[in-house]
Amino acid sequence: MTLQVAPPDVRTPEESRAITERQSGWLVIAEQESRDLWTSGRGLILLFLFSILLSAVTYLTSTNQALNFLEQRESVNLVLQLAVAVGVLVTLVVSADGISGERERGTLESLLVTPVPRRSIIAGKLIAALTMWFATFVVTIPYVWVLARGVGILGQALALGFCVGTLVAVGLACVGLLISGVCNSNKTSIAASLFLMLILFAPTQLPSGLPQGWFFDVLRRANPVDSGLAYISSILVNGHSWTQDLSYLITPLLTAIIAGGALILAGPRLVRLTPGVNAG
Amino acid sequence: MRALIMILLLAGVLIELPAPALADPLTVEVVADPPVVSTVLGDHFEVSTEVKNTGTKPTGEILAHLNVASIEGSVYVDPEDWSSERSQQLSLKPGESRELSWEIQAVNSGQFAAYVVVVPFGGSVNGNEQLSISPLVKVDVAQRTTLTAGGALPVVLMVPLLTGVAAGTALFRVRRRRGAGT
Amino acid sequence: MTSTTVEAVRLTKHYGGRSAVQDVSFTASQGEIVGLLGPNGAGKTTTIRLLTTVLVPTSGEFSIAGHPSTSASEIRRCIGVLPESSGYPAHQTGGEYLRFFARLYGLSRSKANSLAAELLATVGLEQRAESSVSTYSRGMRQRLGIARALINDPVVVFLDEPTLGLDPAGQAQVLDLIRTIAKTRAATVVLSTHLLPEVEDVCSKVVILNHGRVAGAGSVGEVISTALIEQSAELRVPIDLVERARTVLAGFPNLAIDQLSEQPDVLVLAVDGAGTSGGSGDVMNAALAAITAAGIPVLRFELEGARLSDAFFKMTSEAVA
């Protein structure tokens, strides 16, 4: 079989450049990565499993005749905490695959020779990873509606969950991409990210009867996930106002700023064929 | 004789010793409004109190503190659950009054008494001070069923069903694409 | 007049104490097909990665289509690349893959759709446009990769081992496509490959790398001449005509004639004082013509030392020695 090449339409470099500037590379990458994540079924399977978990929690809560008003408020808090925990976890894992996964699959070099700036590649992957968080939150909405409408905290719970969860998810997605850029294999990248999640979640599982000294408080506040969840609890369970415990949001905010800043600064040096940030 | 003189001297000393003085009463008057609140479990309501300095001297720093108690005796009440901001600090000049409002959520059903007590605040407190308390606000909270299994069932079933169908459809399409190539 | 589209000047790339590429210089013009040859580890892929801005040179300069090495984004706009062992997203179809890259190069959705369809037809994958890439054979993936390399209508196309792992038919298809790309699109093609016979057929210029350095460069003929390989030939004639063939060949004073002991019907011819391969070739041609003119059937005539592979082995082994 002889393959024929048709004469192409000729486009000047200036026209090419103008067209490229009109259509942002980060948007194209975000769209494609998101499509790959969702149409392949990977993201949907995770959502399905998460919805089963939430359904179990909601059903057990709703069938508990002895549940009083306060405990119902705590169950809303529990559902939001699950949403933030799971949403942030899957976002971190997806972002940890962002650069190291492309390297291993051999698809990174093709991306590097396109005129899309390295920072745009990172931005696109970050947005695609964050779709996991947003989808997790959307799945959580009906459960929060069922549990929170009777205790008058529906709007507050949804707004709180969305704002705090997004802040934590952005920070950890940036961390995941940083890990992905410096790790020499995808396995290492994902393992490091999961280990990070373990470290972040471990303090939340300590028995409440332990002495709650200043050290524990510092540990809690230094952990972006734990302090974010503590902020949600202080409002939903303890009835505090939004401004009363704002100090809990310092760590999630700093994580997002520092990790995001590092990505912006080191981005071009992270998106390379070889891992690390040394000049290659 | 000598004994009589000792007794008389002792009596004189005792007469001269100053009696322990009672602390100045807090010259503050507290009025609460409304006197009765009827609400439903979970609803928020507001209680206003007017704190007035009825004395001739400034009050110094004082603390108005909200409390809630069950008047049925059978319900455990944690006032922290009813209102997160239960203390408000203020100071009043002679004759000055201040209106304070308290945002409360009815988290238990039954009959309750809400009241505000004004206490002196800060280093000048010696103990034994008189307190000022508002008349109680009677709060009737009607029970309300806020969650039933039946109400939750549609969500409990539909969300996994929808996400499962979506996941299955995506996997089916992926398999079909793969099958189309073989 | 064709313009210079690739110019590399003393390109060098060090990894720590190891030199991957050292002082590599060459040029290529519009419409040329340049073969980048070398044994494994010679620095071919590193050279291509330097020229495609994937790697940063330790020293040296280059320009692509007039854009200096400092203008990486401008270079990327006018090159197409098929990397060695390029991976493809398993869940995407061939059409989706090309549409994605078309949009990365700035095309609108509708133009990306039409261009993807056109390129898939060009490389013979139109029937499999909506099949998952995971179902493609290796040859199909290579063709998809070439289609992607053409998406931006590049001035220079870099193909790193495009025939790797392909069967002979697949190799022929790819080489034919490369030839047509250079001719029809007037693109410069830089082709890294191990297939020396095909390079002789397709490439107008070769650059031979060995241990990161240029061992030889120029047209195929120039490289073979530069290698100064002694040419010899094996001539097989019917056993009863061997002596007669000897008599005919004795008329060439510069021609040394030997006979293989294990194959008495094979004469080994060598040109004394070979000089340039052109001279040796003329003598061989004349000897062969004389044999056929004498009515002696030529059962086999194999020329040694006049092929690119001979020059390649000599150049790369000399550097080792």
Image (cartoon, rainbow, N blue to C red):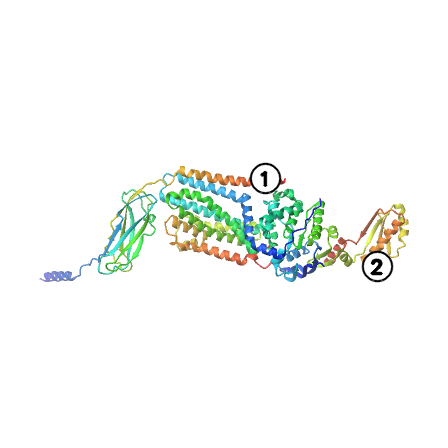
Q: How many marks?
A: 2
Looking at the image, residue B26 lies above or below residue C265: below
Amino acid type, label 1: Arg
Looking at the image, residue C73 lies above or below residue B159: below
Q: What is the CA distance from the residue labelled 2 to the residue labelled 1?
A: 69 Å
| Residues indicated by labels 2 and 1 sit on the same polypeptide chain | no
Is residue B51 shown left or right of residue A98? left
Residue at the spot of label 1: B176
What chain is tagged by disc 1? Answer: B
* Residue C33 at x, y percent in the picture: 71, 54
Q: Quadrant of residue A67?
A: top left
Q: Residue furthest top?
A: B150
* Residue A110 at x, y percent in the picture: 61, 52
Q: Residue furthest left?
A: B1
Bin the neighbour count of mark 2 within 10 Å (Cα to Cα): few under 14, some 14-19, many 20 and up: few
Residue A88 seen from this side: yes
Closest to the observer, B155 or C298: B155
Is residue A169 shown left or right of residue C180? left
Label 2 SS:
loop
Quadrant in the picture for the N terminus of chain C? bottom right
What chain is tagged by disc 2? Answer: C
* Residue A24 at x, y percent in the picture: 55, 53
Asked if marks 2 and 1 touch (Cβ < 8 Å), the reply is no
- Image point (37%, 52%), residue name: A241
Label 1 SS:
helix
Residue A180 seen from this side: no
* Residue B142 at x, y percent in the picture: 31, 41
- Tell us which disc is closer to us: 2 or 1: 1
Looking at the image, residue B126 lies above or below residue B70: below
Amino acid type, label 2: Gly
Residue at the spot of label 2: C273
Closest to the observer, A86 or B46: B46
